[in-house]
Amino acid sequence: MPQPCSTVWPTRRPYATGKCLLLLASLLLSACEPNPEKAIEPIRLGVIVDTSGPTSSLGIAGRNGMQLAVEQTNAAGGIHGRPIELLQRDDGFNPQQATQAATELIEAKVDAVFGPMTSLIAEQLAPQFTAAGVLLMGGTPLSPLLAGRDDQFFRILSHTSPDALGIAQHLQHQLGIGQVTVLIEESNHTFTRPWLADFQRYFSAEGGSIGQTIAFTRTAQTDFATLAQQALANQPRAVILISNALDTAMLATQLRQINPQLVLATPAWAAADALLEMGGRAVEGMITGQTYDLSDKSPAFLAFKQAYQQRFGQSIDTAAITAYNATQVLLSALRERQPQESPKQALLRIRHFAGLQQPIDLDEFGDSSSRFYLMVVRQGRFINAE
C-alpha cells in the first residue's frame, strides 16, 4: 500500500515523494487560479421610481430610460470590465413605501441610485440617502425646494419653472387672457405649490391675475366632475391644471364637456404620453412645456429613439430621455472617478457632461439648468407652440 502524504518526507518509497509534490503543486495552482464569478464584482445601481401608483407612467418611462443606458454600457463591456447590475424598487408615489425601498437599496450596498421621478418622493429620500452617503441621481423632480443643498441629491433639469414663465407669457401675449382659474393637486405639493407661486409671479408681471385657486388631494374617491364645475363657476377663459398626467387628463375631460372652447394649460410634469392616451380629444390645444425636442433629427437622438422603441415597444417621451441622460451622466462619473473618489466627488470634479440634445452642466450643489420648449397638443401629439 502507498504511504500517506506527510509533512515529513519519507526516506523510503521515493515514488511517494513525487506524488506528494504533484498533489501540493496542484493545490497551490488551484488556489491561485481566479474564480470568474468572484473576480469580476458588478457595479450595483439602484433604481427607485413609481411603477404602481398614480405617477407610474412617469416612473416606468424613467426606469426604461435608465435600463437602456445600462444595457448599452454592459453590451460595450461595462465599466472597466465590470458589469452593471440593477436593483429595482417601486416607490408607489408613497413616502412610507419609498423610505422602505430606499432602506433596502442602502442595505444592499449599491454604488448609487437613480430616481425618483417626483419632487415629493425626492424630498422624502434625499436626506436618507445623504445620511447613508449614497448618491441619488434624480429623474424629473423639478422643485426649487431641492436646490442649493450640499447633499447627495443631483439632477440634470432646471428647477426655475421655465414652463410656468412660458405658459404665462403665451396666455397673455398670444391669447390675450388676463385672468385664469387654477386647479392644483396637493399630493405632490413639493412641486405643485412652488410651481404655482412661480406662475403667479410670472403672470402678474405680465399683467394677469388668478381668479380662484381650487386645491384637491387625489384619492380613489376624487370627484373630477365636481372639481370641474367649481373651476368653471366664474366662467374663466382658461384653467391651469397643476397635476400629474392621469389626473390632468381626467380633469380636462370633465372641463371640456362643460366648455369645449376652454383654454387649458399644464406644467411639463403632465406632458407625457399618458396625457395624450387618456385625455384624447379633451386635451387638444392644451398648452404645456417639454425639456426636449422630440422631433430632433440629429443622428445621436435618432439612434436613441430607435433603440428605445425597439427595446420597449413604445415611443420615447421626455421622462425616458431625462432618465437616459441622467444615467449616462452617472455612468460617466463612475467610469472617470479616481481611486478613493466617491460618485458625488467625481460628478462635482467633472461638472460638464454630454447630453443627447445639449450639454449638461452641474453647479456646486449638483443642480443644473435645461432648455425649455413651449408645446401645444395637436392631433394627439405635442408640437412646438412658437
Image: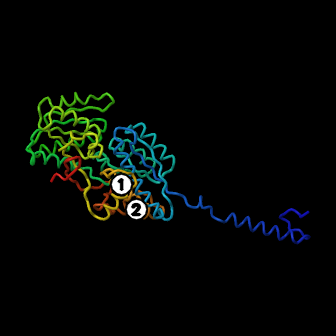
Marked residue nearer the N-terminal end (2 or 1): 1
Residue 42 image point, x, y percent: 52, 57
* Image quadrant in which the C terminus is located: bottom left
Q: Say what amino acid the circle numbered 2 marks.
A: Ser
> What number is the disc on residue 53?
none
Residue 57 image point, x, y percent: 34, 44
Residue 64 image point, x, y percent: 39, 51
Judge by depth and name the residue closer to the eye, 287 or 368. 287
Say which residue label 1 marks.
309
* Image label count: 2
Q: In the image, 315: left or right of 2?
A: left
Judge by depth and name the residue closer to the eye, 197 or 380. 380
Q: Quadrant of residue 124?
A: top left
* Element assignment for label 2: helix
Dot 1 alpha-carbon crowd within 10 angstroms: few under 14, some 14 to 19, many 20 or more: few
Residue drawn at x 47%, y 52% is 86
Q: Say what amino acid the circle numbered 1 marks.
A: Gln
* Image quadrant in which the N terminus is located: bottom right
Q: In the image, 228: left or right of 277?
A: left
Say which residue label 2 marks.
332
Report whether residue 151 is seen.
no
* Element assignment for label 1: helix
